[in-house]
Amino acid sequence: MDKYPLTYNFISKAGLKPNHFLNFINDENENISAFELFFSMENLPGFSEKLEREIKTKLIQNPSSINGEIQWASICAELTAIQLVFKKYGVEISGFDQHSPRSLKENNDCDFSGIWQGETLYFEVKNNSKEESQDIPQILLDKLKQIEWGYSLFIEAKCRYLKITNTNEIIQDIKKHIADHNKWKKKYVPSGVELFPGKFHTDKFIIRFLPQSKYVDSLRYFTSPSLQDICSFLFGVNMPNNSTMTPKIEEARQKGADYLICRLPGFQEFHEIIDKCFKLIKKKEKSIYIVSGDLIKGIVGVILFNKKGEHCLILNADDNQKWYLQKKPNKKIKPTGTAIGEF
């Protein structure tokens, strides 16, 4: 607690609901230093509103759905992005949920603003939540873990943002599925031959049965986003004609952001994403790329980072170089009691 006093002080005094995610945070959590930095900025514009509207009320775990997990991932991505530009690029954070003068719509604010080279820059943060959106509600996972099945179970969502309310009915259906398999196996399969039940299907998920193993500690099975998925998500590259998704770069443009910051799962190398999306790479340094073309038009730059702590900076060769961020330690602001963490 001595390392992150502001965070623990907030948790102890805020009157959070018992199932609030912050009640389960500790010194080893990868996000705690980002929360500590946020709590050190209580005097900035928009802090109180973000605290009341998002931090206190949205980060609630609901055992029957994964909405809380999605909100938690989004907030953590945003606070980690603030930590990144503050610590690594020396941007002086100046406000939360700030309106850019270039925004195309009223009340369409950027996630935060910061001072760089005497100018106010606006930052929009996005999180690729494909992993989180495939998660399984905790109430079903807990039920599955309580039963000795004789197999290792792997469950995969067939749709995103699952909500489960009929867990007892599901458990009975799984038991019947296994019993029917064992009955068929006893009748038709020679003794000693190991044969596992076929997949158990519902309209929401699939369960696979594998040999029981003490080394298996997770029930969940994820389909990771492909390189094409990431490029479409960020820049709309080769997006299907029937897609309703707006590329994140376009969302940032509409909000009048100078920089789009996006957290990715980390399955692809940054250079793979950049090489697929941009044909005109004018300059390439370690973790810094300068590109041109319509995909990045109207934006000074894009910062990509992942859950492994890696990041890169993509700069628009056709924009004002005065606003190019440069890596350097932040010496202007030293929030009291803050452990800023590593990047």
Image (tube, rainbow, N blue to C red):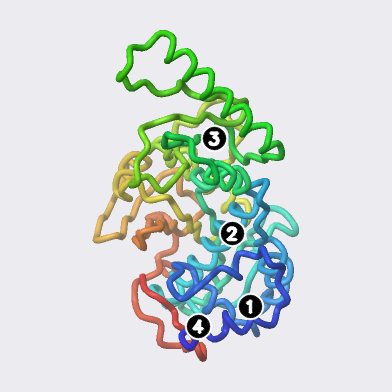
Q: Position of residue 146 (x, y in %)?
A: 55, 46
Q: Residue at x 56, y 31 (%)?
A: 205
The three-letter amino acid code for the residue at tag 3 is: Ala
Q: Residue at x 45, y 36 (%)?
A: 154
Spatial distance from mark 3 to mark 1, Cα to Cα?
33 Å
Earlier in the chain: of badge 1 and badge 4, it is 4
Earlier in the chain: of badge 3 and badge 4, it is 4
Instruction: Determine which residue is flagged by label 3.
Output: 157
The three-letter amino acid code for the residue at tag 4 is: Tyr
Q: Which mark is residue 4?
A: 4
Earlier in the chain: of badge 4 and badge 2, it is 4
Q: Quadrant of residue 174?
A: top right
Q: Nearer the viewer, residue 301 or 292?
A: 301
**Element under label 2?**
helix
Q: Nearer the viewer, residue 221 or 5?
A: 221
The three-letter amino acid code for the residue at tag 1 is: Ile
Spatial distance from mark 1 to mark 4, Cα to Cα?
11 Å
Spatial distance from mark 4 to mark 2, Cα to Cα?
19 Å
Q: Which mark is residue 72?
A: 2
Instruction: Determine which residue is flagged by label 1.
Output: 11
The 10 Å Cα crowd at callout 3, few under 14, some 14 to 19, many 20 or more, is many
